[in-house]
Amino acid sequence: MLTGSMAIGTASPSISAIAEGQSAAYRLFEIMSKEPKIDITDTSGIVLDDIRGDVELNNVFFRYPARPEQLILNGLSLHVPSGTTMAIVGESGSGKSTIISLVERFYDPQAGDVLIDGINIKSMKLQWMRGMISLVSQELLLFMTSIKDNITYGKEDATLEEIKRAAELANATNFIEKLPNAYETMVGQNGAQLSGGQKQRIAIARAILKNPRVLLLDEATSALDVESERVVQEALNRIMVGITTLIVAHRLSTVRNADCIAVVHQGKVAERGVHDDLIKDPDGAYSDLIRLQQAHTEETPEMPYVASSRFKSTSLSLEQSIRDSPRNRRQHSSKSLGLSRSDDLFRHVASREEHLEIGDSEAPKEAPIGRLFNLSRPEAPILLLATIAATLHGLLFPSFSIMMSGGIRTFYYPADQLRKDSTFWALMCLLMAIISLVSIQLEFYLFGVAGGKLIERVRALSFQSIIHQEVAWFDDPSNSSGALGARLFIDALNIRRLVGDNLAVLVQCTVTLICGFGIAFASDWKLTLSIIGVIPFLGLQNYIQLRFLKGFGEDAKVMYEDASQGVAEAIGSIRTVASFGAEKRVITLYSQKCQASMKQGIRSGMVGGVGFSFSNLMLYLTYALCFYVGAQFVHDGKSTFQNVFRVYFALVFTAFGISQTSDMASDSTKGRESATSILAFIDRKPKIDSTSDEGIKLEKVDGTIEFNHVRFKYPSRPDVQIFSDFTLRIASGKDYCTCRREWKWQVHSNCFAGAIL
């Protein structure tokens, strides 16, 4: 009974972990069991040999599920004949982008039909249908991988030749081949290492590789500068010929060449026609939009965005471009499209494998546990009470050795004495049970409260430090949003366990160790010294186990952060994933990242299992030595029966308490590593500190800006010289724009080059 009770007690610290696991499993199973209303894995549905690309929305009513009170489309009807270009314009919030989402079947309308070639897209096989459509949007997202891998999301089994031809059609070849690693160049998180125009051209190459029948352009150039827009427009014009194209545009001057322009107002098509006909009606919706834009912006010449189906050029599909010779292709491009040979001067990207001189040069130092207690100083009264409760808990096991030895000794007394002494020891056990009930509950509750408050404080300080870091710090892949989010969540949770449950067990075991040895030495110091030799081996085993788990924990931490980044990236770009049918691909990539952490977890479990088994070996070895040596001492008259049992129980419970710390080894290792990581965030001084009070404060600022012989390289791209002896003066009150054309600087109005900003 005693051994069984001790086994139950050993399992009690794991109850909190089981509860957390059940809670997490419930949420996971809830997500796993959810049936999607629009299922990409559904293999049923119509699959045509080919489609013409005739798109129609028939009396469509739609509300977003997140905003059921707001009607977005109110009986909208729109027909886009095969091979034509339809521009959709209107005020913000009129439902333009919603039309694109419905054609891609990101959502289903509440009423009405969306048809392709006269067939309701609900009856089509979803994966096949999306394979016929390409989407290029304003808020495009590139995955944190190479340029080549990003382009192959359009066609997973594409050859390098197909990738290069798609990049050439997208006007991306020039800048890609100038990069240090060309198509193997890593683009960074969300393509942060590239300019807006470069990202857009890669997205266009991805769309070209898909060889679509329907092309959807959702304000694809609205966020670009003039030069980047011009290059992207040329690329779009090349691929839109002969393809059904729907364009959502904000700037009306970019859609003048469309075959048809539809003006959407309050969820309906208010007006439609070609540009020349629509502007003839001064009271029309299209004319109102033109006047509204002219009232807010000055008209500047803009290159037409749209290639009409009447545009006289041979089709430049991917298949034909591969058959064409390079010479003919260059001649055709030069004559019919007037391509520029210029490219961005200041946008280069280094390989991810190149050395990054962004973070601190020194390795993170070991986190002193005292720092954590210093952060927990406001909870000092709570920790004091928790320590007292843990001390009482730690005294229980050694004290129980006195009662057990005394209780066993009473069985050798006469009947009257037996009844009296057994009642006394039984009452002592009852008292210990009451003390145990109160102290253990208080111990874990109070340590839990202190740990919870520490989590809140640590996360706040870490986030405060993160948002004040210089921008270059975030260029490091290890400081991506997914990795930082994982650290803020997981590291703080590990610290809470370290300062909460593990600290409670540590205090308890320390008290048990001191009190147990004290009772054992007081009872029979000779016997205690004879069998105490196994205790150092137990401590050595715990130390070795901690060292092994530390190495595993550091590797697992990096793997979990990498997997978390993959999840954040896939969810953040879910429309891109869905549009290109890349669900299986991102799942495979995530599974591969999880496989590495799973194997690491298996190795960690094996080490932990060996350590725990060795702890139990030492425990039973203590039993054996105590009985054997104790019997010899009693036989030789050097000790008494009661003292032997008192030493036995004192050392057994002490060894049992120490063996419990092996359960803490994994959590303790994770907690220390997490403390190191979190404190590194909190302590890191940004190289450009916006909170610093140092520096000159001018009484009056007139706004004059000067660059005097500036040399500059991005920290993440130390091999690319951005500015070399750059000098520029911007006078007060003047509007300047810096832009490159033919390798020279020119001055215009209303904008700045990104590197100068």
Image: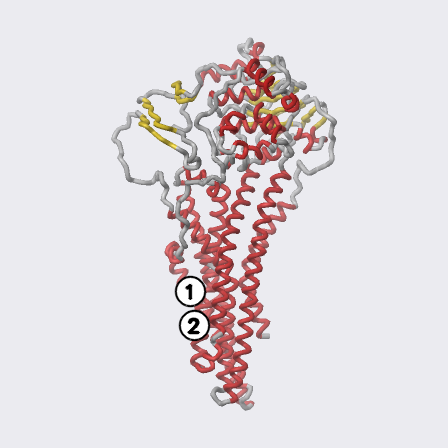
Q: Position of residue 41 (x, y in %)?
A: 68, 38
Amino acid type shown at disc 2: Ile
Q: Nearer the viewer, residue 14 or 540?
A: 540
Q: Mark 2 and mark 1 in contact (Cβ < 8 Å)?
A: no
Q: How many marks?
A: 2
In this view, the residue farthest toward the top is 280
- On the rendered structure, is 521 left or right of 701? right
> What coloring was used for the rendering?
secondary structure
Q: Indicate the quadrant containing the C terminus: top left, top right, bottom left or bottom right.
A: top left
- On the rendered structure, is 732 left or right of 573? left
Residue 472 seen in render: yes
Dot 2 falls on a residue whose secondary structure is helix
Q: Nearer the viewer, residue 378 or 550?
A: 550
Name which of mark 1 and mark 2 comes first in the sequence: 1
Q: Residues within 10 Å of mark 2 (few under 14, many from 20)?
A: some
Amino acid type shown at disc 1: Thr
Q: Position of residue 726 (x, y in %)?
A: 35, 26
In this view, the residue farthest toward the bottom is 414
Res. 687 image quadrant:
top left
Q: Is residue 620 above or below residue 642?
A: above
Label annotation for residue 387: 1
Q: Residues within 10 Å of mark 1 (few under 14, many from 20)?
A: many
Q: Residue beneath label 2, please?
A: 514
Q: Is residue 395 above or below residue 566?
A: below
Q: Nearer the viewer, mark 1 or mark 2?
A: 2
Dot 1 falls on a residue whose secondary structure is helix
Q: Nearer the viewer, residue 168 or 359?
A: 168
Q: Position of residue 339 (x, y in %)?
A: 53, 17
Residue 59 seen in render: no
Q: Position of residue 569 (x, y in %)?
A: 54, 39
Label annotation for residue 129: none
Q: Is residue 484 above or below residue 668?
A: above
